[in-house]
Amino acid sequence: MLGNKNKLSLAFLFILIAGASSLLVAGNDKPVEVDKDSKEQYVKGVGLIEAIDSELALAVKQYWISYIEEDFITCYQMLCELYRKNIPIKEYLQAETLKIQKVEIKKATKENDNGFNIKVHVHAQHGMFVFNQMPLKQNWIKEGEKWVLFKEHKIDKKGLPF
C-alpha cells in the first residue's frame, strides 16, 4: 500500500500532467503561453480541490484555470460551493465553442443565500471576454435547492453574455 505522502505525490504528478495537456487548445497545436506563477497557482489550486472534492477536480482539469488573487484558496472553495449548488459554470462558459485557453477569477465572494458575485476573465482563442461581476446576484434564481441562471444571461455562440 502507498503511504499518504506517496499518494499525494502521485496526485500532484497527475495534476501536472493534466494541467500540461489542458494547455493545448482544440484545433490548435500551439500551447497556450502562461506565466510560471499562474502555472504554480493552478497546480496548488487543483491540488486543494482534489483534497476537497475529487469529482470537482476532474471537472476543473478540463480548463486551464488560474486564480489571480492573493487568497486563491478562497476562490477555489467558492468554485467548490458553486459546483455543489449545481450552478452550471461549464454551461455558460461553453468551453468547446469559445476554445478557452485560460480562465481567471478576479473576485469570488459569497454574498448570502440569494446569490454570488464573481468577476471572470475568459481568455479564448478569438479574444478575451470579461464577464464583469458575472454571474451577478440578480442573474440567479433559486429553484428548490438548486441555483439556476436566468436564460437571458446565458452566453450565445459568439461567447458574449446577453
Image (tube, rainbow, N blue to C red):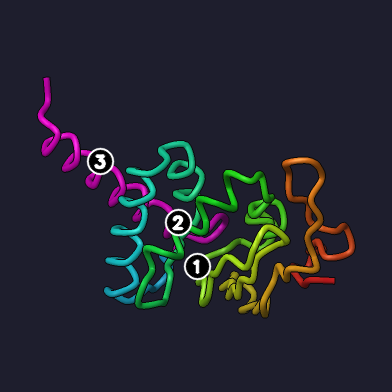
Q: Is tag 1's residue or tag 3's residue first in the polypeptide sequence?
A: 3
Residue visible at 42% across and 64% down in the picture: 74
Say whether residue 16 is magenta: yes
Query: Are the residues tagged 2 and 1 within 8 Å (C-beta)?
Result: no
The amino acid type of the residue labelled 3 equals: Ala
Given this view, does label 1 or label 3 mark the residue nearer the observer? 3
| Range drawn in magenta | 1-30
Q: Amino acid at mark 1?
A: Lys
| N-terminal label among 3 and 2 | 3
Q: In this view of the protein, which residue sits in the foreground, 74 or 99? A: 74
Is 34 situated left or right of 144 in this image? left
Q: Which residue is mark 2?
A: 77
- Outermost residue, right direction? 152
> Residue at label 1?
102
Q: Which mark is residue 11?
A: 3
Q: Nearer the viewer, mark 2 or mark 1?
A: 2
Relative height, residue 135 to residue 13 (above, below): below
How would you rate the neighbour count of disc 3 (Cα within 10 Å): few for under 14, some for 14-19, many for 20 or more?
Answer: some
